[in-house]
Amino acid sequence: MQFGIFSVGDVTMDPTTGRTPSERERIKAMVAIALKAEEVGLDVFATGEHHNPPFVPSSPTTMLGYIAARTERLILSTSTTLITTNDPVKIAEDFAMLQQLADGRVDLMMGRGNTGPVYPWFGQDIRQGINLAIENYALLHRLWREDVVDWEGRFRTPLQGFTSTPRPLDGVPPFVWHGSIRSPEIAEQAAYYGDGFFHNNIFWPADHTKRMVELYRERYAHYGHGTAEQAIVGLGGQVFMRKNSQDAVREFRPYFDNAPVYGHGPSLEDFTDQTPLTVGSPQQVIEKTLAFREYAGDYQRQLFLMDHAGLPLKTVLEQLDMLGEQVVPVLREEFAKNRPANVPDAPTHQSLLAAGEARKVAEEVSEEVDVA
Amino acid sequence: MKLVVVSAGLSVPSSTRLLADRLAAAVDRQTPVDIRVVELRDLAVEIAHNFTNGFPGRALAEALDAVTEADGLIVVTPVFSASYSGLFKSFFDVLDKDALAGKPVLIAATGGSARHSLVLDHALRPLFSYLRAVVVPTGVYAASEDWGAEGLPERIDRGAGELVRLMGAGTAPETAVVPEPDGSPPKSAGPDREARADGGSTRGGAVTRSHGFQVIPFEDQLAALDG
């Protein structure tokens, strides 16, 4: 099972000091956080993509390429890549380039984006959100698998004899997750391709997450990629920890109360009760995270949101130390218990490469048998 | 049959709730129904949090489900500033916009005097028309003076009778469509989608329901783009 962090990349005033970091500071902080993730033994760093203030990460592959050069093991991913408003041709090129540079340590998560004006800013119509996600991804999927593509669709100019370069590393396209919170069409899309499904459950009650994940699992099996239990599921999480849970609550409350997303709304207590947010001791984080399995089944990737709402970099790095030292090792051990042997790990470049070669050998053998 | 009564009265006791109960009792006299009353006063905080959080709390989620699954609906609001109350509107703002499609609804309102009685036809009726509910012809408005005058019981019975006839016709369709966070229409797979829901697929796919979601086979989603 993979553990990692995902960043929204918001530039938010620290409500306890009144200080707002510059864009440069925030961008450098995101890099420092990614490097820390590798240092403390996490597996994945994912960045969001936004095209409006107060967010900085508009150019994910630039940032991830820089991080790739400074890390050894960390898988670089996105949360999410906008499949609706980006040109799928450019996504194919950018992420193949990143994948080559990072020696395969790359996957990505498709998302639609829910900021209305971004669509017209990029020449699209938000009412076509689902259709854009479906058509653009169908093209992206082909661009990474066919050397020469002829294509015509509704939303983009046609392609004749187009080759997306560079080709995916070793002929293996980056693994793709599809992120969605409440659109069954996207769960269906992920299931159809046998891709991963990431439910960003951090603002949602467990019951809703359960139904979305069950739908994806059922459809994954329907399309013959494996059993429902073998479907590739990722979940979000959101934590703030201190040794004593009262200290965690006291320190995090002003950030919660003023956070751009949920500030000035529900109480911290209601929110921790109804969503995956945990504010407390490492042990409480462990207990709550382990419970995700009860409603989502054995899953493959757990990403935590750690660096938002104006939390200072120093605090975030302390949080990552605790996450890496005290939480994730226990989660690895506990999640491994009673995990059926046929539940796969999240695909990596190596595992996809090996699977592809095994498939090739099997095909050659069957061809030889046919000839004989 | 399930009758859900949404009452937006704020005081306890409330004349809005009184009217709601009289309407529900009138329906029950004409045909036995399971009555569930949703008091918006008790949900006020969760409704406000639904706007800031994006999801309903437990009690509100249960009330929204009850409304969605009802065979008929009675909605009663006090008149505030020449319209329905903000709380009343807010409840229907957080309800899935397809939840009332085809559902029989009896509209009612209370006020201090008869001067606001057209609120039924100028405010409530357009709201429920927008939500594609089937609003019964008679709306019931009760001013303070009506509680001591003739005519209110007859209007209550007439409205209730109209609601009962529509509920009997079984016009409430399957609902529970998942809304899009981006405000895009959840039904975007093409005009032939309803036909396919009836089993008239030409591509071998079929719209099915699973875990409370409507599932359109991916091939159909893809093919709809070629049209």
Image: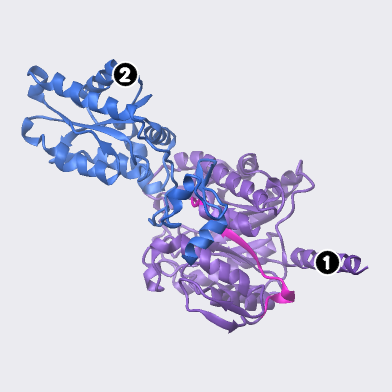
Chain colours: A purple, B blue
Q: Residues within 10 Å of mark 2 (few under 14, many from 20)?
A: some
Pointer 2 and pointer 1 on the same chain: no
Near-viewer residue (A165 or B1): B1
Near-viewer residue (B133 or B201): B201
- Count of numbered marks: 2
Residue A228 horizontal/vertical position (percent): 68, 46
Q: CA distance from mark 2 to mark 1?
A: 68 Å
Q: Residue furthest bottom?
A: A161
Image: magenta residue range: A167-184
Residue B226 horizontal/vertical position (percent): 49, 66
Residue behind mark 2: B31
Chain under label 2?
B
User: Relative to residue A159, is residue A106 depicted above or below?
Assistant: above
Location of residue A149 by image quarter: bottom right
Residue behind mark 1: A363
Label 2 sits on a secondary structure element that is loop
Residue A198 horizontal/vertical position (percent): 58, 55
Q: Is residue A304 visible?
A: yes
Q: Quadrant of the N terminus of chain B?
A: top left
Label 1 sits on a secondary structure element that is helix
Residue A146 horizontal/vertical position (percent): 66, 75
